[in-house]
Image: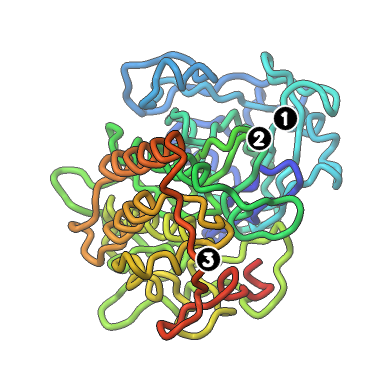
Amino acid sequence: MGNCFGLEEAEVEAVKNYGHHGQTQAAAARALPMAAPKPADASMSSGHRGSRSPSPSTNSSSTTARSGADAGAYPEGRILETPNLRIFTFGELRAATRNFKPDTVLGEGGFGRVYKGWVDERTMSPVRCGTGMVVAVKKLNPESVQGMQEWQSEVNFMGSLSHPNLVRLLGYCVEDKELLLVYEFMAKGSLENHLFRKGGTFEPISWKLRLHIALGAARGLAFLHSSEKQVIYRDFKASNILLDMHYNAKLSDFGLAKNGPTGGDSHVTTRVMGTYGYAAPEYVATGTHTLAHLLLPRNSNQSTAPHEQPHATMPVEFTRHLYVKSDVYGFGVVLLEMLTGLRAMDPGRPAQQHNLVDWAKPYLADRRRLARLVDPRLEGQYPSKAALQAAQLTLRCLAGDPRSRPSMAEVVASLEEVERITARRESGGEGHHRSSRSRSGSDGARSSHHPSPSSSQR
């Protein structure tokens, strides 16, 4: 499933999915560890009021309902013993979205469409358009064979985890053949849009704001890794980082998440899933072969509509080792994208620059060449020392050996130090880097704002 619940201007990512043929929606609902009600349950008829979901099997010392106060009362997040999920009726969500009218569509993908809806903030009952609280309603296409397992995973993980840097799942609906999810609305959309899309809607984000977003995303990922049952996110990328009205970062899309290793194991064994360019090398490699031919961005030579996901997430039939620190590699890729303003993968760039990590690593390790790598849209408005430390952290995250990568707790500490350096330089009114050098030269770096991505990558 994709992060189709943000950006009021209707810039939304399409859903990435994998499914199991022959599995019905009803079966998916019955398989939920959280004991989601079966479609045949009388309490789920459209004439009934919604209710709260029953307790999952997850253990925790806290039973407090999740709310906006979580950030203050539980700054490190928590696992909920009783998830505070509203069980909506289909009729309620139909009313909240004005009968799923086309003009409420935020995005569309393999899972189905995502609609903008309005509910009462206290009761979560549907209200008139433009009043109450805005929510995002993700609706499964009844004809789709995709998204069943992702739907379960979203409810299981997002319903039991609470942290200021995780998108809140507000509730769900299971009724007849209908499966829907209701999320908080993220007004500023995805980090991907702000980094890569051009036009009046998106202005370049400053160095300070990029640090703020990176730190929020790092804290969310660190919480997942340090929770009682380690959670491996498995699909960390810019399009899965959503921003609220104040540009606070929240991780979305837990469709591919996995519980981490237990019993002293260092890894779990799982089917290879993810997005090419972000997945760690130990995860996508299989002997002497790689998944490059399977996980290339979809329709790389075709125009991509604003709501479409340019990266394909595809299933394969073999398994590989997945480590907690496989997520750290993905974080390093996103940090590199934030540093450079370039996509992880872009066939529109010169051949040697298609893969950003492979091309950029020498720049990260060289203080003198780093300035040519940094996003020129920053116009030199960043402390050179802070940029160097961020580059060094990025390089550590991208280490080939998972054991050489920092933990996400260490990443958070490093980013906090970079943020302090930036704050000190701003208060002192000095230390900003200004370079007149272009990206062209004997080292092969391109001038202007990066190699112009192809239309398919916009």
Q: Nearer the viewer, mark 3 or mark 2?
A: 3
Question: Which label was assigned to residue 343?
Answer: 3
Can residue 1 be seen in this snapshot? no
The image quadrant that residue 303 belongs to is bottom right
Residue that label 2 marks: 185
Q: Residue at x 21, y 64 (%)?
A: 401
Q: Position of residue 67 (x, y in %)?
A: 53, 19
Percent from the top left, x then y, of residue 5?
A: 65, 42
Element class at badge 1? strand
Hey, what amino acid is under mark 1? Val
> Is residue 413 positioned above or below 279 on the image?
above
Q: Nearer the viewer, residue 144 or 329?
A: 329
Location of residue 24 with respect to 215 vertically, above or below: below
Does label 1 or label 2 sit earlier along the sequence?
Answer: 1
Q: Earlier in the sequence, mark 1 or mark 3?
A: 1
Horizontal and vertical percent position of residue 316: 43, 70
Question: Circle 2: is it few (<14), some (14-19), or many (20+) Cα within 10 Å?
Answer: many
**Pick the front one: 367 or 56:** 367
x and y percentages locating residue 414 in the rendered image: 30, 43
Q: Which mark is residue 389?
A: none
